[in-house]
Image: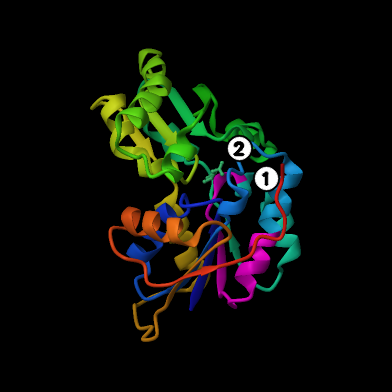
Amino acid sequence: MRVGLFDSGVGGLSILRDIWRLMPGASTVYFADTANFPYGTKSEDEVRRCSLRAVDVLMKYHPSAMVVACNTASTIALEAIRKYITTVPIVGVVPALKPAVAMTITKNVAVLATERTLASRAYQELKKSFADGMTIIDQPCPGWVELVENGQIDDAEAEQAVRDVVEPLAAAGVDVYVLGCTHYPWLRPLIEKCVGQKASTLDSGEAVAKKLQRVLGYQTANDTERQEIYLTSGNADGFQKLASRLLGRDIVLTLYVKSRGEFG
Ligand code: DGL
């Protein structure tokens, strides 16, 4: 059983971590499309094109299922991917708005995500279904994904960038923060420091891993030939170092995938 995942960079590794926790026997192939990072400020067409190319890369590894481990790609391109690939189940990432609405006491929820995700029809529809009687604040987070890709997840610059976004939200009474971009869980210690003890942060990693378990009928870790493959369209060395640091152990294999086109 092999699960294929892609993201514009190291964000989807936060989903990979949750998949390993629930499915420790599953083999994984992870594609970081770093040559086309960031997805979050691209046009919808560009995000769709990058996503379909990423799926092409993963299909070469014959996955049993694929995870679009990026909220931007999921909200924009999931439909197109499912039309393109009909032989493999595709699991997308949705901002955790539903559990956030169930959890908030102040009825003020902030959804932290990329501009592209917040503007997407898929996200706006999700909001319509769950936001009744709630104040939902759509909050882009300028610079956060770049900080994570730079490995700046715990320095003073990152803390300031997080404070700039979160403090006004806390002052407005937000008590639940949806991490609607897969890069943001890597900033969670800083985010939690800035939101205060009474607030919560929610991401979608566990929900994605549970969905994948169901889709694949995964039960026990009896896969004796478990394999982890890492691919990047960007700098292989840089990705290997950052991924190892974020995952807390040396990743064993990184292959370079030549990017077939950039967007200016
Ligand atoms: N990790 C991606 C997401 O979940 C976005 C990062 C980017 O802008 O490329 O939306």
- Check the image and name the residue furthest to the bottom: 224
* Residue 33 marker: none
Give SS at disc 2: helix
**Where is 62 relative to 79, above or below?**
below
Precedes in sequence: disc 1 or disc 2? 1
Q: Quadrant of residue 239?
A: bottom left
Give SS at disc 1: helix
Q: Residue at x 64, y 61 (%)?
A: 54
Residue 162 in the figure: left or right of residue 42: left
Q: How is the image coloured?
A: rainbow
> Does residue 110 show up magenta in the picture?
no
Q: Residue at x 58, y 32 (%)?
A: 127
Residue 109 in the figure: left or right of residue 121: left
Amino acid type, mark 1: Ile
Is residue 46 at least partly visible in the picture? Answer: yes
- What residue span does the magenta drawing correspond to? 53-72
Would you say the residues marked 1 and 2 are in contact, meaning their CB atoms lie under 8 Å apart? yes
Q: Pointer 1: residues within 10 angstroms few (<14), some, or many (20+)?
A: many
Q: Residue at x 49, y 37 (%)?
A: 97
Label 2 lies in ligand 1 vicinity (Cβ under 8 Å): yes
Amino acid type, mark 2: Thr
What distance separates the C-alpha of mark 1 from that of mark 2? 7 Å
Question: Label 2, on which residue?
Answer: 117
Looking at the picture, how far across and down is residue 137, in whole percent? 51, 23
Looking at the picture, how far across and down is residue 53, in whole percent? 69, 61
Question: Label 1, on which residue?
Answer: 76
Looking at the picture, how far across and down is residue 45, in whole percent? 76, 45
Looking at this view, is 146 or 92 the one in front? 146
Looking at the picture, how far across and down is residue 176, in whole percent? 38, 29
Q: Residue at x 56, y 35 (%)?
A: 114
Is residue 18 at least partly visible in the picture? Answer: no
